[in-house]
Image (cartoon, rainbow, N blue to C red):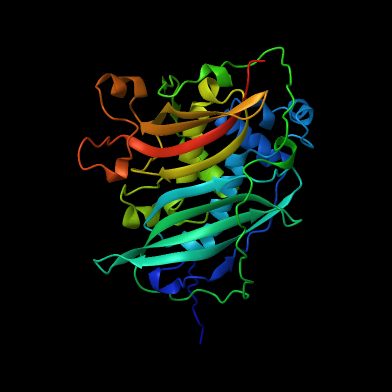
Amino acid sequence: MTTVKNPRYGRKLGDFVPGETYAHPWDVTVDGGTVALFQASFLDASPVYASAAYARALGLRDRPVHPLLLLNLGLSFSVHDVSEQAIAHLAYLDVRFPEPAYVDDTLTASSKVLGVKAASSGDKGVVHVRTLLARDDGAIVCAFERKALVPAGNVEGRPLAPPSAPQEDPGDLPRLPPALRTRVAHVARPAGFGGFFEDFAVGDVYAHECGKTVGESEHMQLTSLVRNSHPLHFDETYSRESSFAKTRVVYGGLVLSWVLSLTSRDTTGNALWDLGLDQGAHPSGVVAGDTLYAASKVLATEEFGPNVGAVTFRVVGLKNVRSRDLLATGVDLFADELSKKEGKVKEKVVEITRTVLVRKRG
């Protein structure tokens, strides 16, 4: 008699135990093709991740892997064990990039359960995890916390995995790689974008003009590239039954990356590193055919040395409406969407606080 097995992955609320660690099975060597495809897909303006000559002049070994690619790999690796059954991704918290990664580095990740909270309705709950993405030498290249909404119950048929060693508390990880932690060299460029540290003032608002229409095959290809295994993003039959949109939903890490890239010519064309992302959320979803737009507000500036400074932005992403058109109506575009009782912006698809190290005009 044939035994039919139906393996399933991810976890439901009853499968999470605070303090447990899940060592994710993905073990991926980043190649030049992955880096090139990511750069071509997101058109980020920072020269650090595009120009090996510029990166070396700053003291880095080579052109580093873009931090947003690292975040997408860390998020996606964790789906297999954490969120393949999830209803929604709720929050990005304390994202840091303490060390660079380069082409030919092999990356792995683990997640530790920090908290589990059942909803009063009893049919779902929130899981809080910390994920660490590391190079093969053990150096952490991306660390973040996130919260996911998962259904109640337990996953039946999940294959037994090898036991995972406990994830050690990484402590207060640095926000810069070693080459940028001391005095940062001034690197002259014959050309480049505007937006130096001196050009930003608290309260400035940027209504970024260009949009990005998400292609149907494009978002599925990139989701597979970073190893995100949630069927919501590439399985149309599953999505017709289980998606709020009744079709495939674009993976949120890609939405975040496209929105931040839409801001880059105006705000991060002279950025040297991402000091961190925090207080991020996806108030609504995106499907193929939606067009993304972005807006940024300067929240803070801080001197960081003779050649650089830190600038903190609140960035929002919108679908199918330009930010300048919404701003013209007087809407409060930068307030935390999920805590609003009124004045909600239904077109908002992502909001996050981003701090970057920006070179001075010098």
Q: Above or below — where is 98 with respect to 327?
A: below
Q: Horizontal and vertical percent for residue 143?
A: 58, 51
Q: Above or below — where is 157 with respect to 80?
A: below
Give the farthest residue toward the left: 342
What is the total number of numbered labels drawn onto the structure image?
0
Evaluate whether residue 335 shows in this view: yes
Q: Above or below — where is 274 with respect to 189?
A: below
Quadrant location of the C terminus in the rendered image: top right
Q: Horizontal and vertical percent for residue 283?
A: 34, 43
Q: Above or below — where is 195 with respect to 86?
A: above
Q: In this view, does 78 lie to the left or right of 342?
A: right
Q: Is residue 142 left or right of residue 311?
A: right
Give the farthest residue toward the top: 190
Asked whether 128 or 86 is in front, the reply is 128
Evaluate whether residue 322 shows in this view: no
Instruction: Give the quarter of the image for residue 124.
Output: bottom left
Instruction: Please name the residue shown 32% across and 36% down the image.
Output: 335
Asked whether 127 or 347 is in front, the reply is 127
Instruction: Please name the residue shown 75% across and 37% down the image.
Output: 179
Instruction: Please name the residue shown 51% across and 20% down the image.
Output: 266
Asked whether 315 or 235 is in front, the reply is 315
Instruction: Please name the residue shown 71% across and 53% down the image.
Output: 139
Q: Horizontal and vertical percent for residue 295?
A: 41, 26
Q: Horizontal and vertical percent for residue 297?
A: 42, 27
